[in-house]
Amino acid sequence: MQNAILGLLASGPVHGYELRTAYEDQLVPRAKLNFGQVYTTLERLQRNGLVQNEVVNQSARPDKKVYRLTDDGRRRLYDWLKKPSKFDLDLRNETFVKLMLTRRLAGADAFETLAVERRECLERLHEITQARAKAAEQKAPLRTVLLLDLAVFRLEAFAKWLDRCEELFREEDTR
Amino acid sequence: MTDDGSTLAVEVRGLTRVFGSGESKVEALRGLDMNLSAGDFAAVMGPSGSGKSTLLHLIAGLDAPNSGTIRVAGRDLSTLNDDELTLLRRRNIGIVFQAFNLLNILTAEENVALPLVIGGTSRAEAHSKAAAALDRVGIGQRRKHLPTELSGGEQQRVAVARALVNEPLILLADEPTGNLDSLSSDRIVMLLRRLVEEQGQTILMVTHEARHAAMADRLIHLRDGRVVQEQTLPPGREVDEILQDLESPP
């Protein structure tokens, strides 16, 4: 969030209010940021000397406060852009725990769990691939298409992992 | 609508197919049942060796089962002689393979026109239908090119046009994206989807890619030569709605 805001300020000063719409319009489609989040982050960035604000006098309307990057802020942004991101592997996975339990407990069937999970995964994949196709057809912005692609490939990886679980459970059972 | 008035494009009952014998015997299909209604877009999924391609080849009449029945457009394939089978295939079935199987000495349009010419259609009519089919798959402007002058994705589009040129009741696709990079392969499946939505084309597609199978409306999961699960997928939602549901990146 902090870095996203630094990034939005990098091409020129922006009013706090406009940051929220810029986040949705330029970065993450349909993202819902609340003002509280935006202002808390701006305050923190200011405390750390990465952002400063100035008041712009407007003759016809009330003065407005705009935020701009400091040199430190710009350095911090470009350092961050060059560094690898922390990869979110999400291994505290509900399905994983369920599968491990259904393999151990009497009266539970891991293959049933796999079937249920696969159905759900394919249903989500269906929704998102359809939306992705529609977005491409309607010439939606590339960021929309790519965000949907990210969801598609994650779901597909999950489907592959479910298949792998099934193969290895079967192998284990015939041993 | 099929010949006997029902809406089943394909009806398969108790299908078995065994390859080899003795030690090397492989039971590819072990009593498989399935239906395909007109207008369906169904994907057959399953691990390799589950019988996916065997099933498709049997429905296409390219191979014969050991037992069981296959009805295509209401006709039991086992009751047809070679000529009748050829005719039924020509009228009702278009096939797209993993390898595009285009003739490299013919242009895109000539490749697409070929099945019509072989079937006795005049050259002029065959070529005008071929041009129309190439337009339908979005590649009309490349119709004078040789396959070697086209990308993989474009060649597969030509193969789809060739499969559609007879306006078949059913389009069978056997791993249609197996030879393509990920972006071109997604676009081929989107094209199939569009044929279903805009022209009511009936499609049965074999694939092992979950994201391609998920573009269909119905999923048929095979394992060990049998259907182990069928799934009808719900209609899509608006792009905006989906986006709002997605977890935003930090």
Image (spheres, helix red, strand yellow):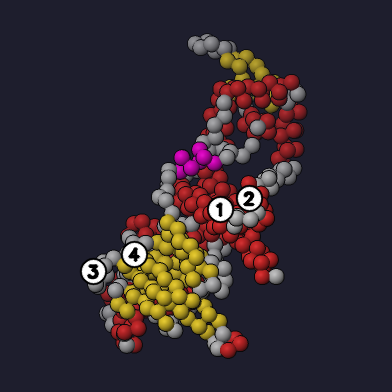
* Residue type highlighted by circle 4: Ser
Between the residue at mark 4 and the residue at mark 1, the CA separation in whole angstroms equals 27 Å
Q: Nearer the viewer, mark 4 or mark 2?
A: 2
For disc 3, the marked residue is B5
The kind of residue on which mark 3 rests is: Gly
Question: Percent x, y for residue B237?
Answer: 43, 45
Q: Residue A116, image x and y in percent? A: 53, 54
Q: Chain of mark 1?
A: A
**Nearest-to-viewer mark from 4 and 1:** 1
Q: Are marks 2 and 1 on the same chain?
A: yes
Label 1 residue SS = helix
Q: Quadrant of the C terminus of chain A?
A: bottom right
Q: Reading the chain from its start, which is encountered first: label 2 or label 1?
A: 2
Q: Which mark is residue A98?
A: 2
- Image height check: is B209 above or below B51? above
Magenta residues? B239-246
Give the number of the disc on residue B183: none
Q: Which residue is mark 1?
A: A117
Distance between the alpha carbons at the discs numbered 1 and 3: 38 Å
